[in-house]
Image (cartoon, coloured by chain):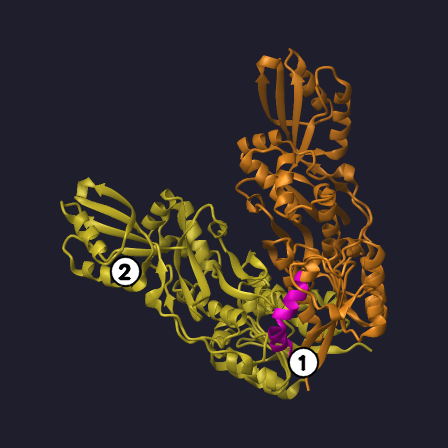
Chain colours: A orange, B yellow
Amino acid sequence: MKKITNIAIVGLGQIGVYLYNELRIRKKQIENKTGNKIKVVAISARNKNKKRKFNIDKKIFYSNPFKIFTEEKIDILFECIGLSDGVSKKIVETALKKKIHVITPNKALIAKHGDYLAKLAEKNLVNLEFEASVAGGIPILRTIKEGLATNKITKIHGILNGTTNYILTEMEKSHENFDAVLKKAQNLGYAEPGNPKLDLNGFDAFAKVRILSALAFNNRISKSKCIMEGIENIDLKDIKIADQLNLRIKLLGISQIIENKLFETVHPCLVSKDSYIGNVNGVMNAVITQGKPVGESVLQGEGAGPGPTSSSLLSDLLSIMRGNIKKPFGISSEKRKILTTFNNNKYTNSLYLRFEVKDEPGVLSLITNRLAKYDVSIKRIIQTPDKKNNLATIVIITHKTSELNIKNCLSIFKNNKYIRKLPVLIRLYN
Amino acid sequence: MKKITNIAIVGLGQIGVYLYNELRIRKKQIENKTGNKIKVVAISARNKNKKRKFNIDKKIFYSNPFKIFTEEKIDILFECIGLSDGVSKKIVETALKKKIHVITPNKALIAKHGDYLAKLAEKNLVNLEFEASVAGGIPILRTIKEGLATNKITKIHGILNGTTNYILTEMEKSHENFDAVLKKAQNLGYAEPGNPKLDLNGFDAFAKVRILSALAFNNRISKSKCIMEGIENIDLKDIKIADQLNLRIKLLGISQIIENKLFETVHPCLVSKDSYIGNVNGVMNAVITQGKPVGESVLQGEGAGPGPTSSSLLSDLLSIMRGNIKKPFGISSEKRKILTTFNNNKYTNSLYLRFEVKDEPGVLSLITNRLAKYDVSIKRIIQTPDKKNNLATIVIITHKTSELNIKNCLSIFKNNKYIRKLPVLIRLYN
């Protein structure tokens, strides 16, 4: 007789309900691949009667998700609510303690409580799987944990947020400004209609960076933010200037080991239009891993949306059903290291600086003198006058400069009568 | 007490000896990740005293690999000889029958005897793993079997042979002809010094296509070759003309389901220089998968060489050591289908045709009339005269044309006094 795997889904938003439907239509396929049957025995959400994309079986609906534990025998629980704390955490905690496997696409939860929950899973000999939490349909976590398991990884970077990548791509293409394109993204369902802040300010990408680091470097999830900048201040003007310079602005997440310390960051980068990463456009995500002996490997795919996410959720399901009991982070919690954080101030890049100035004699030399004083050496200057208004735009590309130097250097321009606002700074990707 | 996993390596060529060294230097890491120790208890090759990149422990050396089975207790055997039959097959067969897990990078063996060996592995409840057989360090098989497990895959295509990709890239860059660049590739170790034929004629890529299809479509490994063409006949002239047309020649492996039938092919393709695949250069490999619900996903990485290959071999090792007993092709052998083969003649592409002709009146109309007669409709003509010799090159890009039509159409040009040789035909990638 075949074993039946009992499944509960908690949270029936866009992802949860799509998953629910996938489990229905792929029942036979899952049975074929694993030899076991599945049965969704419980679903839960706040609103039973909300209009959803797919019909739900109201007979198995629970308004209180915690009741599922007492009334049903569950083997695997999908947490699809998406909070970093609250019910999400409580549900996952309870399930693991009751020796129920948990699968979740919730990056906020894992980035915040992943270490604790992983320990709990290991203690109870069940799986905690979160492939869908990073880069949607791209099986990047599995690739690091298994495919590249014995490689010494030194760096991971990539485009980890589809919303911001869509916005940057669209601004370049349409020459519309940030606000207009954000509205377009919201209409297309690429950005949260209510509060898209967590995508735009880099928070979402940063949570993913933390999860990637933990897997790649076998460290506990870090708590310190090296640099986190989003795209809210990216001006159409910078996108156009980048274009002329054969560059393109991308929001990159980067995690690397520098001098045996961990450096994690999310910030906009200028990358070459001829580079691989410069051609990952729209809602696509891409993750580039540098490791030994494997060299550089690239994974690219759709980073968001219920289809790709559900592909990853189902891959976790199959992995559990095939009996792979695994440590959530690849190795046991007690073996995971705590890495010290690399000092931001020493982070070094070529920089793009844009000054908006009054077009008066001596302004350029004011700027260049100041840069020289702080050892910021100039690679290229492009000055574009706006004669009518007696203004000018000065763009400077610097040689490699540390964060500390440039911070000190630029501070003076805050209250300068010739400089109309604080200069725009965008790092060039090395 | 920790379990010790006993390992044998048969074949100590470039791959085998690199793997042997990796097992030595990554011992501790493997123990950390799996909780178990490893011990290489036997190695075997034809020549005990050959000069190798890394020193071997001669105390565990066997000249006759079959003796290992009687003298040692082995848990996992690496087959690194690389033959499609002979000792390679015999060793793998014997190991599986003795309930020893087998890991191999041997695509020729798997493409030819994979179905039989998979059955044997399943019967004996051991693993047969071959991640390294396709696309070196890219964990593409694992991604299809696990990461994309419940997706309905409709098409896989990619650059599956690093040698040919290097040659095509280098011809374009250096404007040297095929023979000169092949020699360069051999000197750099990218092409077999003795007989590079299996790389150049598409055979190597085709073996990989077969393995990919079997995993993606759950079918038995196909026996029929739809179209297999290599790069031996790619002329520098075509590379230069492609360049002018903003195109690039790539040797693509393609596997897809058309009208519920399996179509597998390897042939040179003209791709746009602006496309993703057009920018995978040098020895890099890339595999693009189209599936539902995941959409398009791309994996790129170094496709060959002992480093990447050994990364994949070790990922298989860890998977086995973590206790993942898996069906070699993802599902059990009896559930794998036999797909009928799509008829070549119905394969349809835009075509690049290059005619070398005598520059006499009426030649162009001779060609265009013939094309018209066979419904081959022309998108573009570029005629370049060579006045001095009274010759001309005519390049024609056609609209979509079936293989049958073009074959019949071109046959007449074989014995035509105005046409200097059979026209060159390169398909454009759709």
Residue B9 among those drawn in magenta: no
Residue A349 found in image quarter: top right
Q: Nearer the viewer, residue A55 or B93?
A: A55
On-image quarter of the C terminus of chain B: bottom left
Residue A20 among those drawn in magenta: yes
Boundaries of the magenta span? A18-35
Left/right placement of residue B338 relative to residue B243 reads: right
Q: Is residue A307 visible?
A: yes
Residue A176 lies, with reference to residue B216, above or below; the image says: above
- Residue behind mark 1: B75
Label total for image = 2
- On residue B406, the disc is 2
Sequence order check: which comes first, mark 1 or mark 2? Answer: 1
Mark 1 residue crowding within 10 angstroms, few (<14) / some (14–19) / many (20+): many
Parent chain of label 2: B
Parent chain of label 1: B
Residue B400 found in image quarter: bottom left
For marks 1 and 2, give the one nearer the viewer. 2
Left/right placement of residue A145 relative to residue A296 reads: right
